[in-house]
Image (cartoon, rainbow, N blue to C red):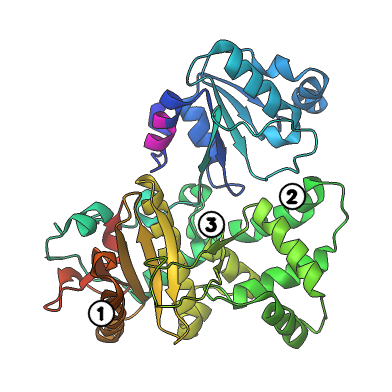
Amino acid sequence: MENRKYRPRIIDSTVEDYLQAFGAVCIEGPKWCGKTWTSAFHSKSQFLLGDPSNNFQNRSLAQLDPTMVLKGEAPRLIDEWQEVPAIWDAVRYEVDARDEQGQFILTGSSTPMRKGVMHSGAGRIAPIRMRTMSLWESGDSDGKVSLQDLFEGHMESQLTGEIKLESLARYIVRGGWPRSLAVPYEKAVLLPNGYINAIIDDGANRLDEIKRDSSKMIKLLKSLARNESTTVSNKVLRKDIKDVEGEDISEPTIASYLDVFRRLYVVEDQPAFSPSVRSSVRVKQAGKRHLTDPSIACSLLGLNEERLIGDLKTMGFLFEALCERDLWIYANYYGGKLFHYQDYKEKEIDAVIEMPNGEWGAFEIKLGANQIDGAAENLLSIRDKIAKDNKDKVPKFLCVLCGLSNAAYRRQDGVYVVPITSLKH
């Protein structure tokens, strides 16, 4: 792919590093998030399983002899490898035979059943998770503050400019789909609905040989949209579907469909965080529910920019989802992980980033500037509670990630305030 046509992604440096360390990498993530474009940028030859040319001849050739797809200049891109699972073992074997780094780049928008796959690929094929674009990647964050600044305590207070509520609503409704940058906003908002149809009509049916009820899958997705950025249980999802949609779906079916959505990278749970395994602070273990991009929730619930602004409570949850999507991307750049915190006294921290060295930072996410004081007090209260058990386990920093703040600064109590539209990795 020509450099001038490629929009850089944060994951680029990770791909380069992994290609120097492993024989192959596998870039995994939701459909349409940019996996093929990024992989093509880093490859020197390619084989596309989804190419419809000559009645999908590529797929037929791969099924006849998986080794045929491996011939080409390295790194060689093999797109949507899960269409022919035998390719995985062929790549693993070839990596061992060549004994060289950076031979193959695989992409996958679903996790296939392990039927027909003999080996895990551990040590040979390194997985890399890709998500939709962050605001920094789409050009909607000025990047005046970095995650590294916060962990190192180097953030400088500065004016960042006024952000309108309409702009934040637009970022949520449009989502982080790379294709959205090449079309007018009025057309870009159609992409999430197209994604949902692709998942239901194509992705779920081609995942395995099991026949699933599309109507029930849509209703479950709508329930997840109504409960975005919460720790809702499967039991509560069932009640919500029955109350709102008028259909009773069994909990085993809900669990089964959630597994399908995870394998298609449609949903992702933000796990719970504990500051210390020996801490007396008991934390709940429920993960926070997320659709892969907040725009999907908007599409499922029929929310455009105006309707979202008219329902600020819902907008608050979806703004939180947008921020946590970005934090996930920024944390992954450093090998970090994203969590949330919730103890049994209902004390919560919206997002926690833990770095590989064990250092962690805590974020409260608030749409309005009028919520900053309360968010800062909550962060300080939880930090002080944790400090009573183990002073070595307190967060490296506390930060209120805000929507409608016109400045990035450090408060007198030490809590940072940063607009999401000024944050980068």
**Comes first in the chain, label 1 or label 2:** 2
Question: Quick one: which residue is furthest to the front in this view?
Answer: 278
Query: Where in the figure is residue 129, as x and y percent of width and height?
Result: 52, 45
Residue 16 magenta: yes
- Residue drawn at x 68%, y 45% as measured from the top left: 111
Identify residue type, mark 1.
Asp
- Residue drawn at x 42%, y 55% as measured from the top left: 337
Query: Where in the figure is residue 89, as x and y percent of width and height?
Result: 70, 26
Residue 25 - label: none
Task: Confirm whether residue 305 shows in the render.
Answer: yes
Q: Bounds of the magenta span?
A: 12-17
Please state if 146 lies on the left or on the right of 20 as rendered. Answer: left
Q: Which residue is mark 1?
A: 384
Judging from the image, what secondary structure is the residue with disc 1 in? helix
Task: Confirm whether residue 319 shows in the render.
Answer: no
Q: Residues within 10 Å of mark 3 (few under 14, many from 20)?
A: some
Using the image, determine if residue 95 lies above or below residue 78: above
Identify residue type, mark 3.
Ala
- Front residue of this view, candidates 311 and 337: 337
Q: Which residue is mark 2?
A: 203
Using the image, determine if residue 19 lies above or below residue 367: above
- The span from disc 1 to disc 3 (Cα, nearest Å) is 45 Å
Q: Which residue is mark 3?
A: 188
Identify residue type, mark 2.
Gly
